[in-house]
């Protein structure tokens, strides 16, 4: 572990090292291996560091077969054997805050309710832990969050130490370690003892704060979303901007906003219902007009532009209600598509399913239905008027 400077001191922002090897991986990505590094490689739920080596961007860091590869944006052609590396400190410290915060929150849930953490993800915006419980109440969430923030305010030491497998029995581990050699424990005295290979601050106070955002059931577990440290401020800023904008749009103070939104949704539902009723009346008038102006008795054929197939179906049913002897043949051209509806009263013998099936073959279409009512659509390989004439000829 001597070459992993991030374990010796996670606060080191720059370092000097010797190049051991250069190479390309199977995908052709360029990397170099150094004799020592402060760049943390992806592992243990924590993302890798980024930064620069001799002003060339480090875009990924991975440990492969015991060697830490620093993936660069382009091939490294620096002539000197000795190089200078600089860590993106904002990203590193953010990861330190989030990872330590996860330890604290997971320990809080386990200490209070014996809910074990069985999954962890550190994302760019939020963190998640999966708790081994199907049910999580709001009261439990509040208590765990309160305890976690109390531990932060106490500014307890966060100690990292290397132990042997035999020495593990001395510590009340939150979960068993997977590794047998080079075992690293991260310890918050009298609160949390956990095997971990990530980077952490020297005291809980540097985590600043923990805020749980939401939680939901995931199969037989519960996934908790939260943020720590500077991300809490970022979340507060984002949500505050949204609230300010909503107060302007709703013309309502923040405390009355839920009532205003409920009222707005109810008004929207009422308007939607009124529009549906109005459309229904319009369709009835349209149906009667089509019946009155049909050129052949009881055969209503019409071409439309940009009508949905749902509207055509509803209009056809209204016509059949108004005239039980009617035969309805509708074609609507919607850009480069044709929509067809063919319907008749049940007393007629002609099969609408067969009529529309033959028509759909002409436009590479698909559809279906019954002998009395069928619909479908396809490419506008012929004009809507030509399609209507074909349907008329078919009956």
Image (cartoon, rainbow, N blue to C red):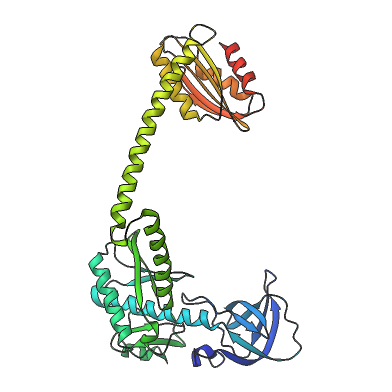
Give the camera-side residue of 197 and 283. Answer: 283
x and y percentages locating residue 131 in the rendered image: 33, 68
x and y, in percent, of residue 20 in the image: 68, 88
- Residue 89 against residue 383 in the figure, above or below: below
Q: Quick check: 131 left or right of 389?
A: left
Give the total of numbered labels.
0
* Quadrant of the image occupied by residue 191: bottom left
The x and y percentages for residue 9 are 49, 92
In this rendered view, identify the residue nearer to me: 389 or 25.
Answer: 389
* Residue 41 in which image quadrant: bottom right
Is residue 163 among what the camera can see?
no
| Image coordinates for residue 240, horizontal then vertical, percent | 39, 66
- The answer to whether residue 257 is seen in the rendering is yes
Q: Is residue 334 left or right of residue 100?
A: right
Viewer-nearest residue: 170 or 353: 353
In the rendered image of this protein, does residue 15 appear above or below residue 304?
below
Q: On screen, 340 above or below 288?
A: below
Judge left or right: residue 112 versus residue 300: left
Along the viewing direction, whichever of 316 and 349 lies nearer the viewer? 316
Q: Quadrant of residue 301?
A: top right
* Location of the C terminus (image quadrant): top right
| Residue drawn at (67%, 70%) of the image | 26
């Amino acid at each position: 572990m001597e070459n992993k400077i991030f374990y010796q001191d996670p606060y080191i922002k720059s370092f000097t090292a010797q190049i051991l090897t250069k190479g390309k991986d199977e995908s052709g990505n360029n990397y170099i291996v150094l004799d020592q590094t402060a760049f943390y490689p992806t592992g243990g739920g924590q993302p890798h560091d980024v930064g620069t080596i001799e002003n060339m961007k480090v875009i990924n860091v991975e440990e492969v077969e015991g060697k830490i590869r620093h993936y660069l944006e382009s091939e490294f052609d620096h002539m000197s054997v000795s190089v200078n590396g600089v860590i993106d400190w904002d990203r590193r410290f953010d990861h330190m805050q989030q990872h330590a915060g996860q330890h604290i929150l997971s320990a809080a849930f386990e200490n209070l309710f014996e809910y074990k953490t069985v999954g962890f993800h550190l994302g760019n915006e939020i963190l998640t832990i999966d708790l081994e419980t199907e049910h999580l109440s709001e009261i439990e969430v509040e208590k765990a969050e309160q305890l976690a923030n109390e531990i932060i305010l106490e500014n307890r030491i966060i100690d990292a130490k290397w132990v042997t497998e035999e020495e593990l029995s001395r510590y009340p581990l939150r979960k068993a370690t997977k590794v047998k050699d080079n075992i690293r424990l991260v310890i918050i005295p009298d609160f949390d003892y956990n095997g971990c290979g990530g980077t952490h601050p020297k005291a809980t106070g540097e985590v600043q704060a923990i805020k749980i955002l939401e939680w939901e059931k995931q199969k037989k577990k519960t996934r908790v979303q939260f943020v720590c440290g500077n991300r809490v401020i970022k979340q507060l800023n984002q949500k505050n901007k949204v609230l300010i904008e909503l107060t302007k749009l709703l013309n309502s103070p923040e405390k009355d906003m839920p009532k205003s939104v409920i009222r707005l949704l109810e008004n929207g539902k009422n308007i939607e219902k009124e529009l549906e009723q109005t459309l229904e009346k319009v369709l009835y008038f349209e149906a009667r007009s089509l019946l009155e102006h049909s050129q052949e008795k009881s055969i209503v054929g019409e071409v439309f532009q940009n009508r949905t197939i749902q509207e055509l179906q509803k209009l056809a049913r209204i016509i059949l209600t108004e005239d039980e002897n009617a035969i309805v043949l509708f074609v609507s051209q919607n850009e480069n598509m044709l929509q067809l509806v063919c319907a008749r009263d049940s007393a007629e013998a002609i099969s609408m399913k067969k009529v529309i099936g033959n028509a759909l073959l002409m436009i590479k279409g698909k559809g279906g239905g019954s002998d009395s009512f069928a619909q479908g659509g396809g490419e506008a390989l012929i004009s809507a008027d030509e399609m209507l004439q074909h349907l008329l000829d078919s009956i």
